[in-house]
Structure formats: C-alpha cells, structure tokens
Image (tube, rainbow, N blue to C red):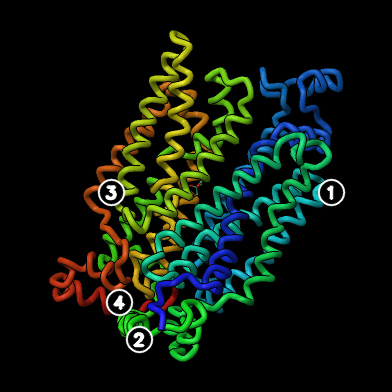
Amino acid sequence: MDSGKQLTGTLAVAVFTATLGSLQYGYSLGVINAPQKVIEKHYARALGVGSERTAVLSKNTTEEDEEIPGEGIHRDVIMYWSLSVAIFSIGGMFSSFLVGFVGDLRGRVKGMLMVNVLAVVAGLLMGLCRMWKPHIMVISGRAVMGFYCGLTSGLVPMYIGEIAPKAYRGALGTLHQLAIVIGILISQVIGLDFVLGNDDMWPLLLGLSGAPAILQSLLLPLCPESPRYLYILLGKEQEAKESLYRLKGAYDATSDLEEMRREKQQADKEPRISILSLIRSSVYRKQLFVALMMHLSQQLSGINAIFYYSTAIFTLAGVAQPVYATIGVGVINTVFTMVSVVLVDKAGRRTLTLAGLAGMCFCAIAMTVGLRFQNDFSWMSYISMSAIFLFVSFFEIGPGPIPWFIVAELFSQGPRPAAIALAGCCNWTSNFVIGMTFQYIQDWLGCYVFILFAVLLLGFTVFTFLRVPETKGKSFEEISALFQKGRKKQAQTPKGNAELQQLRTSTDA
Ligand SMILES: OC[C@H]1O[C@](O)(CO)[C@@H](O)[C@@H]1O
C-alpha cells in the first residue's frame, strides 16, 4: 500500500482545474495594459469626442477645454479608461469578503462551479461590447470579472491547501501564483498589436478572459470535494474517506483521518468564525497579523508599480522596444515562479520570503541609483533594467506565491474561511491603492520613488524575520500550536475564557 504521498492523476486534474481560475485572474490583470491606445480610440468614437488633440480641434474648438493639456485625450475618455482599469480591483475588494460564504455554502468545488457564471457573463459583456456603448459594456464586464476574480483568488488556494498532501502543500499552493503569472504572460503576448491588440480584434482579446471558465466548468465535476470540508464541516466521514482515496490512491488513511478527527473536535468547539469576530478576537490575533502583513508585503513591495509602469520605465531607461522588454519581465516572472514551485517545500516558506523581500529591497535601491544617474552615465540604464528583472525574480521566489497559500496553513478549519476572506480583501485593497496612487507618488518623488518601496521592504523583511514561523511539512495542528504558546495561559484567565466562549457562539461566517 502506498504512503499517500504520491501525486495521483486525480490530484493533478483537481489542481489543474482549480488553477484555471487563477489563470483567468492573471489574464484579466494583464490584458488591459497593451491595447490602451486602441481602446481609448474606440471610447472616444463612441462618446463622440476625439482621442487626438488635432481631431478635437478640427471637430469643435469649444471641446479644447475638456482636454488634458499636452496629452490630447478628452477628459471623458480618460475618466472612462481609468474606470475600466480600476473597477476590476473594486469588484475584487468587495467579493473577496464573500469567499468564506461561497466556499462553505455547497463546498469548494460547487463554489468554483457556481461563480463561473460570473466569468462567462463578464467575457460576453466585453466580447460583445461593440453591440452597444463599448465603454459601458467594458466597464460592466471588468466589474463582474473583478468580482469573479476576488472570489477565485480565495477559493483556489483554499481548495488546493485542503486537498494537497502535506509534503507538497507548498509546491501545489504555488501553482495558484504560477497560473496567475502565465495568465499575465499570455495576455501580454496576445495583446500585441499584430495578434489581438488591434482595432478589429480588441473586443475578442478582452472577451477571451472568460474562456477558461468554460473549460473549468467541464472539468470541475471530475474533481473530488475537499475531504476536510466533507468531514470537518459536514461530518461526512465516509465521503471524506472516499475523497481521500480518489486524491491519494490506495493508501492507509488512518493518520489523515485521525488528524481530521482532532481538527473536527477543535472546530466543533469553535464553530465557524465570522469575519467580525476574527478581527475582534485576541485568540487569533497573531496569526491574523502575520497573514495580513504577508499580503501587504506582497502588494506594498511595489510589484505592480513595475507591472503597470514597466513600459514607461523601460522607455525612460532608453530601451528601443519597451513592449518586448515588458514581455521579458513576464517571462522572468513565470520562470522564477517555477523555481519557487521546486524550492518551496525544501527551503521553506520563511526562508524564501525573507530572501525574496531582502533581495527586492536591494533591487529597489539599485533601481533608484540607476534612475538617478542615467543622464550622467549611459550604462546606468543597464543597472535599472537588470534591477527590474531581479526585482521580479526575487518577488516570485517567495513574496509573490507564498502569501496566497500560507493563510490556509496558518488557520484551522474554523477560522480559515474568514481569514482567507480578510487576507484577500487586504491584497485587493492594497493593489488598488498602489494602482491609483503610484502615478502621484512618482510625480512627487521623481527618480527616488523606489526608495519608498525599499524602506517598506526593509520593514517587511524585519517583520518576517521576527514573526513569521516556518510552516513547511507541519500539520495544521502543529502550525496552530506554534501560535498557541503563551496563549494557553491567557485562555485560562477570565478574559480569555469569555472570549473563547464568545467565539463559540459566533456562527455568521
Ligand atoms: O506576478 C505579479 C502579480 O502577482 C500578484 O501579486 C498576485 O499574486 C499581482 O498583484 C501581480 O500583478
């Protein structure tokens, strides 16, 4: 009989199917960048205004006041364009709160299946945008797609974290990020103007973001439900056992069942914990702080400043074909996420996060030096470019993939859905804030803008060193015990007892 540590075909199908949702998230993140000019032109046409200064002037001189000076784009076009970009994150910010509810309603697999309706609707709205007002159709489609991605960015790591054998939990968890970065890369390549990023094909380019949902809907019925959901939440031991056998092959499931039994006993004492009670509770404060800080460090590292503005940064650094350099960033991004898949269960989450954050901090300083002196020494632009590539590599080694799956590792079954929802919301909100403010911060700090991220990265490195424990190869019980030290005493105090009691009565997750 096998040890239960082997990777079976069913497990591979289940993980592949789940990560189709992550692929869609990555595609939607990246797809909007390359065809900006083309889409703006169509918005302008639909709005009856010019997208070029000359066009506006020749049409109606009174509209000149409505233009952004020096840019030649009508104010309304800019407004609708910015909304098309930003509404995606706003959708995600809201829906990430619902991850626990959707995951617990009918289970992880049915949850992923249900929300696919959103992705298909979003894809249709964008793909058919020329049939009505394209700006309204695209904005609606992006809002629905953002809402879908907020759910999927929580459901996928939750499902994978619960079905993965302990020995591969990190590698399989990292596949969520790998699918995100592959999605970004695909969108960069097919967004090139000679592929789909042109006047005729751009609605198809946007509409395709819903396509993986169709494939995923066909495959999800083949995926076993999470044994932890079946056993710990629903108390269905036999079904959980069958699910374990499907995922792990013929093996002795005694120790897995025993571990789930103990987790169930624990979960029965503290039924589903709501988001609000999780925030208020001092019982889970340490775990929650670590989870939120890890998501903040992912976004406040400045990674999306690089992604959203890399073409502009490469232009500044004097690169002749900045679009291809940006695709180069996408390739490096993908390669180093693959490196992380291989390393994460050997080197550990803590080590890789520390190495990644410290490396990014160093690169942010190098980028600043490069940008500051590029007019004095032409070779400085090579420093900035190398620093960008290295920055992205360090990100994907640890700070990119690890926060997504470590939240599922840090919490036991009771508070897990609420914790994933909060961490997801923190990620989406900080992503949105960076997207909205980076341009202004750049205007304010000029070539010193990455010093800000260097300082933040240093802070996150110190935090990780002091507070983030290693979770590699540990059972959920053992991980939870890491945070219990010093809490046992507290639970015995009247305040600690009262709080546990209050958590037990809270069921509105
Ligand atoms: O690969 C970079 C991408 O990864 C994410 O952090 C998600 O994990 C995105 O916000 C970012 O665009």
Amino acid type, label 2: Thr
Q: Earlier in the sequence, mark 2 or mark 4?
A: 2
| Residue at position x 50%, y 34% in the image | 306
CB contact under 8 Å: marks 3 and 2: no
- Quadrant of the rendered image containing residue 221: bottom right
Q: Earlier in the sequence, mark 1 or mark 2?
A: 1
Mark 1: give few (<14), some (14-19) or many (20+) Cα within 10 Å.
few
Q: Residue lying at the far bottom in this picture: please name it.
A: 238
Residue position for label 1: 132
Mark 3: give few (<14), some (14-19) or many (20+) Cα within 10 Å.
many
Where's residue 141, x and y in %? 70, 53
CB contact under 8 Å: marks 1 and 2: no
- Name the secondary structure under disc 3: helix
Q: Nearer the viewer, residue 205 or 436?
A: 205
Mark 4: give few (<14), some (14-19) or many (20+) Cα within 10 Å.
few
Q: Nearer the viewer, mark 1 or mark 4?
A: 1
- For marks 2 and 4, give the CA distance: 33 Å
Residue position for label 2: 254
Residue position for label 4: 502
